[in-house]
Amino acid sequence: MRRKKSPSENPAIRFFRKLGPGLITGAADDDPSGIATYSVAGAQHGTALLWTALLTWPLMGCVQFMCARIGMVTGRGLAGTLRLKFPKWLIAVATFALFGANTINIGADLSGMADSAEMLTGLKAFWFVPIFGVAITAASIWCRYEQIARILKWLALALLAYVVTGFIIRPDWPQVLWTTVIPTLPKGHAMWGTLVAILGTTISPYLFYWQSSQEVEEEKSEGRKKVVDRRGATAQEIADRKVDVGSGTFASNFVMYFIILTTALTLHKSGATEIATSRQAAEALRPLAGNFAAILFTAGIIGTGFLAIPTLAGSGAYAFAETFAWRQGLDENLPRARGFYAVFAAAVAIGIALDFLHVSPIKALYWTAIVNGLLAPFLLVGILIVASNRKLMHGQPSSMTSRLVVGFTALLMFGAAIGMFVF
């Protein structure tokens, strides 16, 4: 909930008060899917793709802020706003595609979390999958939005595990920084595929839907229940959200950098380039980086999973509710928003079921990231069209700079996808 700042309020406290949907969305980007993709990038290609973290931060920041602005200005979520401009059948196709990708992602995330829990406790991973899934679903249904948002903000601290792990391995920083600022162009199908996966898991469709819907939730929590009451945003609200989104996306890409760095200087350096599960990645780290680093890496997967799964299931639920005009929101009770919560629960339930098919979680996550990388640019075009429309945006369209950056992002993702198939 936004609060009026006091002139005497500590600047640090004022900064942290601004953090909300942008921080949560940015942190949720480093879910087990992201961790798997970045681990594969580091294990297979070493430090060659560290430079992508410098590229994806501004791109992700502009995309997420454009989605935030759509939610703040129109008073609707992304699917609801797109429906005003595009045919309903087209929005429905995108919604079902989002649900499918998110459900696979949830299943793989639960599997990765369960493997990590088994490593830490010694109990069979089999039992943790339904326990985690049911606990997340129950908490999302019974807790109010403000409680959920507060929990998710604290869970973002789990990302610090990967930064600490990166320092534990004591990199040769001059050499690492040189590799970071001097890009290595992708060579061959595998490296192009990894680049598409990085872009797909960093600039991912479910984050677009979640960001805009959380802006609506924030305004509803302030008493603006009707769409007409939520239209428009003050200059201060927009400035605060820029800080929020900028901080969240920076944290996301900062952590991404350290995951690639950690796996590059341990797994790749030792020749362990083929990893199939999160457990294999953590176990390979143990003799190379020490027991503490392996435990941090493992615990981080559980923490980020608890943060990301509500985001994955929730974004699909918001998309369905907005597409088919259902009552929606994490602040609604179950009887009033049955359809919304049914989609949420179905996504988690199907994800749990997928885990009993014995699909490699890291491979599933990695290929889901590639699918998102192929789908995201088409969605970005729709977002760009909506954000540029003065009528839909009630006289507050996105700036020309933002539109140019998001347009470049869409072209880059189209180009990377073409490069993967051509080369």
Image (cartoon, rainbow, N blue to C red):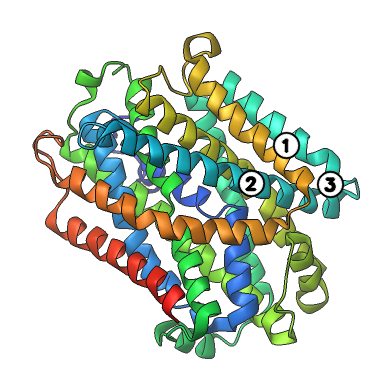
For the point 51% across and 72% down, which residue is it?
193
Asked if disc 2 and disc 1 are in contact, CB closer than 8 Å, the reply is yes
Instruction: Return the residue at label 3.
Output: 125
Q: Residue at x 70, y 79 (%)?
A: 273
**As rendered, which of 172 and 61 lies closer to the eye?**
61
N-terminal label among 3 and 1:
3
Count of residue discs = 3
Residue linked to disc 2: 305
Give yes or no for contact between labels 3 and 2 (Cβ–Cβ under 8 Å).
Answer: no
Q: Nearer the viewer, residue 267 or 148?
A: 267
Number of the front mark, 3 or 2: 3
Circle 2 — which element?
helix
Q: Position of residue 163 (x, y in %)?
A: 59, 65
The amino acid sitting under disc 3 is Ala
Is label 3 in a helix, a strand or a loop? helix
Quadrant housing residue 17: top left
Q: Classify mark 2: residues with Cα within 10 Å, few (<14), some (14-19) or many (20+).
A: many
